[in-house]
Amino acid sequence: CLTFQDLLKKHDMRSVDLLVMDVEGYEFEILNSINFASIRPKFIFFESSLLGEKKILCEQLLTRFSYSLLDFDVDTLAILDFIDPQRLPKIQL
């Protein structure tokens, strides 16, 4: 098992455009471990249907770091604030 930071270091990654997670309810723990001061994925896509009350914690964490959130049935897309979600193309899932 690797932390997110260790994974980036292992592959010598300094930036992330898209982070996709499907970790069966552990999304908050992973998001909470990310040092958003040093790495800011432009998009974070995660399954939110199994989070229960932790979904609110994920939303609070991401909005605190300037992400806008869009829900798609069982998934959530977080978009870094420099993109206006209203200008995104409509996505059919």
Image (cartoon, rainbow, N blue to C red):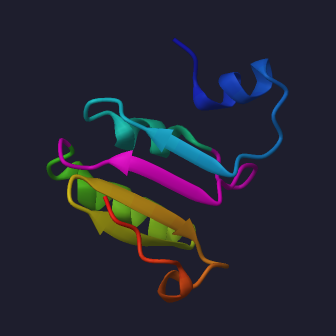
* Marker count (numbered): 0
Q: Is residue 79 magenta?
A: no
- Depth check: give the residue in front, 39 or 86: 86
Is residue 81 shown left or right of residue 15?
Answer: left
Is residue 38 shown left or right of residue 75?
Answer: right
Spot occupied by residue 57 in the image (x, y as percentages of width and height): 31, 57
Spot occupied by residue 3 in the image (x, y as percentages of width and height): 58, 24
- Depth check: give the residue in front, 91 or 12: 91
Q: Is residue 42 magenta?
A: yes
- Depth check: give the residue in front, 70 or 54: 70
Q: Residue furthest front?
A: 92
For image coordinates 36% across by 43% down, the residue present is 28
Spot occupied by residue 91 in the image (x, y as percentages of width and height): 40, 68
**Image quarter of residue 83:** bottom right
Q: What span is colored magenta in the figure? A: 35-50
Question: Looking at the picture, does residue 17 appear above or below residue 62?
Answer: above
- Depth check: give the residue in front, 78 or 93: 93
**Image quarter of residue 21:** top left
**Image quarter of residue 11:** top right
* Quadrant of the frame with the C terminus: bottom left
Spot occupied by residue 46 in the image (x, y as percentages of width and height): 39, 47
For image coordinates 21% across by 45% down, the residue present is 51
Q: Residue furthest top?
A: 1
Question: Looking at the picture, does residue 57 appear above or below residue 12?
Answer: below
Question: Looking at the picture, does residue 56 appear above or below residue 15?
Answer: below
